[in-house]
Amino acid sequence: MSGGHSEYNPSNGFTKWLDARLPLPRFVYDSFIAYPVPRNLNGWYTFGAILAIMLIVQIITGVVLAMHYVASTAGAFNSVEFIMRDVNYGWLMRRLHANGASMFFFAVYIHIFRGMYYGSYKNPREVLWILGVLIFLLMMATAFMGYVLPWGQMSFWGATVITGFFSAIPLVGTTIQEWLLGGFAVGNPTLNRFFSLHYLLPFMIVGVVALHVWALHVTGQTNPTGVEVKNMKKETVPFTPYATIKDFLGLSLFFIVFAWFVFYLPDYMGHPDNYIRANSLKTPAHIVPEWYFLPFYAILRAITFNISIPFTDIVLINSKLGGVLAMVGSIAILFVLPWLDTSKVRSASYRPLYKQFFWVFVVVSVLLGWLGSKPADGGYVIAAQILTAYYFAHFLIILPWLGWYEKPKQVPPSIADAVLKKKSTAAQPAE
Amino acid sequence: MKPIFSKLTGLCVVVFLAMGVSGAFAAEEGETPHYPIKKPREASWSFAGPFGKWDLGQLQRGYKVYTEVCSACHSIDLIAFRNLSGLGYSEAQVKAIAAEYEVTDGPDEDGEMFERTAVPSDRIPGPFANDEAAKASNGGALPPDFSLLAKARGVERGFPLFVFDVFTMYAENGPDYINSLLTGYQEAPTHIEISEGTYYNPYYVAGPSLAMAPPLDDGSVTYDDGAPETLDQYSKDVSAFMMWAAEPFLVTRKSMGFKVMIYLLIFSLLLYLTKKKIFAGIKD
Ligand code: HEM
């Protein structure tokens, strides 16, 4: 849908001059003003723009925090409190940044589920999808390291637990772990490199986001019907004002939720233990990650058994490594999703069975998150094992099987047909 | 499509059964009892809700309870005397309060440390030179610093309360916990064994008993504003003071939040109307 042709007309001497040398205004015009979007996009499609703005919010508040933050085990906790108490509007910056991270993940999960519902990952948008999964991974790394910076009890113990997983890698595990930590345990070198990387990674995210948007502008957006645009004139509208106003509205509503947490419930998403200075001699009763990691944490802890060669005592994969592999696998599997879903129909609106399985998958993911917050004992583990098995079955069994088993509904011949039909049925009862 | 739908419903039933069974298991296996034994009682706080305000009289009384009782064991490291103006004290009052304390300063030109009268920019000095000294005087238990304690304690609310909390803006977990703890000391039930030098308290998060003896009782502190001199009142006042110490900008935050909300609501409405107008212009 990029079209290759451009409708930009430099209007004055300067823009003409610049256009012949660095056509930046043309680029902006073609990408954010004239860029054609399907006319039938719904509200779920505004989350991409919301994510872009949230990334900018994180970077701006983060850069301000970094001006006052002290990356040392002796100074970190107090410097964050200094920001909260003595820096002008420091409390606001920090609340925006910490809650912003949560909102960022909230938005990215909706964005990902939107993609799954409308089959956005399918041909020809595989690369676009893979870049998205890459952004998600970078976000996870960034948020994990950011959470270590305030140097509270959860910061310290979360870092200890998570970096501990690297020691599960056979042979080289401990070496890798010590290399990451810069020592034998989480300490000053760890905090310093985490700060350095926490500052770096968001800018790498910006880079991947640029590629993501580029890929998007090559293939064009999907739309709720899943049918590609056939008639540019009838089925698309220019980005500005149509998509811009919708994105602004989505953003504004999203900010109401964001502000609700920042101003009224700023500690709701956090853990009280992180207001206790890190203490390597005192382990908290429950070490839990931030809420957005909980489903993966549940998968990690679900693997409580060794995998051995049948009828022998030879352990192939011990439970610790198994857990790490399952957790890594649960994200890695998203990379190959475009090839696991064998259905030719894109949108769940025309896939009656997939639509149900999609919602079951959403519920399973939420339940896994709930289990991740529970202690790993007794029945919770059994439930987590069942749901973990289902999580993988969704991708490895259900999606490939649905592709040939399911009889999709009649897909409309074009977006224009779908829109007009909807309009006429909506208009009738009102008459 | 019908049969599959029921299969899916079946699957959901299985999943939920599994969750139910797992819950039952978890409860049964709970040989280690869960703490706290009792959930905190919810009190009403002037600073709760979207329009929460400090009750300055209460904060000053709470500060009095802190200095006269708790400060014998608990420090409040992050608070400087100048911060006390947030409790409604004038500059002169803050100076006078600071002048009652001696702090160590130096080194002077001879390389010696010396004592001097505190000034408003000094932090409120704690009762002990270091954690080890604090433990030594408290039977090995460390009395935690008060600066952040009201945010560092929060008993898990559990489903479905934690969902409702988002809408009711319940964020007083800390003061509710402290208030419940201070007023919750009881005779230990006979079936619960308490280690020596500790006191049974069903509200304590980390066990059946803690190393702090009940610090307050009716009449322990004299109030000069006519507020009741009861355990309940002391406890509420000092809990509110601790919330202030942990989050001095709480009221500023909420009142700014209100303006932001109004702004965003109006802005969203205008955007919505604009969007409607723009989209009405699309021709089929
Ligand atoms: C992808 C975007 C980002 C995410 C998801 C993110 C996430 C986080 C998280 C979860 C925390 C811990 C918050 C807390 O509990 O206090 C944090 C802290 C911090 N972040 Fe970021 N961050 C991002 C970008 C940045 C950037 C670009 C900078 C600096 C240039 C930055 C600087 C800091 C600093 C200094 C802290 C420690 C202060 C504090 O804990 O509030 N962040 N970040």
Image (tube, grey):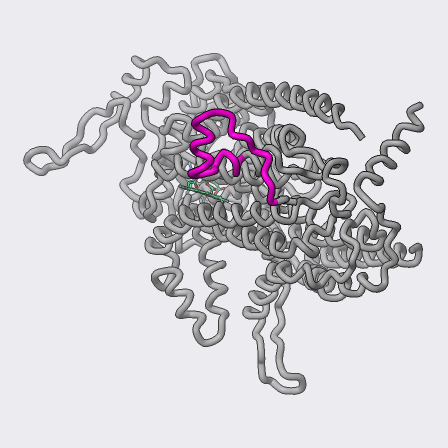
Residue A297 position within the rendered picture, expressed as x and y whole percent measured from the top left: 59, 57
Residue B219 position within the rendered picture, expressed as x and y whole percent measured from the top left: 47, 23
Left or right: where B257 falls relative to A345: left
Left or right: where A342 falls relative to A422: left
Screen quadrant of the N terminus of chain B:
bottom right
Left or right: where A60 falls relative to A414: left
Q: Is residue A22 magenta?
A: yes
Taking the spot 39% from the left edge, 35% from the top edge, the residue there is: A64
Toward which corner of the image does residue A264 lie, by quadrant? top right
- Residue nearest the observer in this picture, B193 or A63: A63
Residue A84 position within the rendered picture, expressed as x and y whole percent measured from the top left: 41, 32
- Residue nearest the observer in this picture, B160 or A233: A233
Task: Write the start and end of the magenta stretch as one range.
Answer: A4-28
- Residue nearest the observer in this picture, A141 or A39: A39
Taking the spot 61% from the left edge, 64% from the top edge, the residue there is: A329
